[in-house]
Amino acid sequence: MPEIEHMNNEVLNRVPAEFRPLLNLEHLTTWTLDRQREHNADHGDYEAARAMFQAVLRSQVVEGDGRWSARRRARKVEKHLDRLVKASRDAAQASEGLRTAYADHVRTVAALPGQRAAKAKAKADRRGQVNAFATKSLNKTVAAMTARPDSDTEEDGETTGQSAGKASGGRTVRGVNDLFDRKGA
């Protein structure tokens, strides 16, 4: 059964044998449709019984009754029939819900490996893009640091607002980067 291929065998062995076929979607569909048919038939029977009880019990007027006395007495019986009607309707809807929810579950479990592979590929692609961006940025930084001329003349693009001064080694200092030894870069 492809529906239970990801299930632990120990767990599967604990499931009673008569319920194991329900883990197959086709068997579950047949089973839930049978339950739904039964609950709908019960629903019809309960509604007919409720209508019969309403007609009979509400017509039992005893001498000295008030206007709503027969209806109030009948209501004590009708509320139990109302519960039966509601329970059978809810059970039929729950059977259908079980079938659709299990079908969605099976579809989701079957799709998970593909989704996870796609997600891992996208993550690897993002990492590759970030690595490429970081490499490009570092290469630009290294190129900018090594391409700076060591002449004593001031460049036109200076933005520090300070004039170039002489460092202790005889070099011209124009900014913070000029204070570091650039030989290792």
Image (spheres, rainbow, N blue to C red):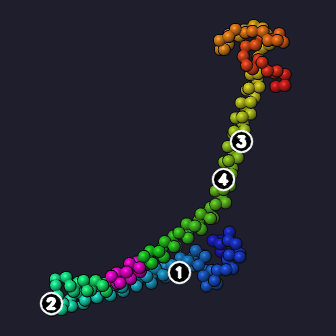
Q: Quadrant of the C terminus?
A: top right
- Return the residue nearer the eye: 160 or 9: 160
Image quarter of residue 128: top right
Q: Which residues are magenta?
A: 79-89
Residue type (three-letter) at the residue carrying disc 4: Ala
Please give left or right for residue 139 compared with residue 70 in the image: right
Q: In this rendering, is residue 132 above or below 68?
A: above
Residue 48 image position (x, y, % from top left): 32, 86
Q: Earlier in the sequence, mark 3 or mark 1?
A: 1
Distance Cα–Cα, label 3 vs label 2:
91 Å
- Per the image, the residue denoted by label 2 is 64
Residue type (three-letter) at the residue carrying disc 1: Trp
Q: Earlier in the sequence, mark 4 or mark 1?
A: 1
On whether residue 121 falls in the magenta region, the answer is no
* Mark 4, secondary structure of its residue: helix
Residue 157 in view (yes/no) = no
Residue 80 image position (x, y, % from top left): 35, 84
Residue type (three-letter) at the residue carrying disc 2: Gly
Distance Cα–Cα, label 4 vs label 2:
79 Å
The numbered mark at residue 118 is: 4
- Per the image, the residue denoted by label 3 is 128
- Per the image, the residue denoted by label 1 is 31
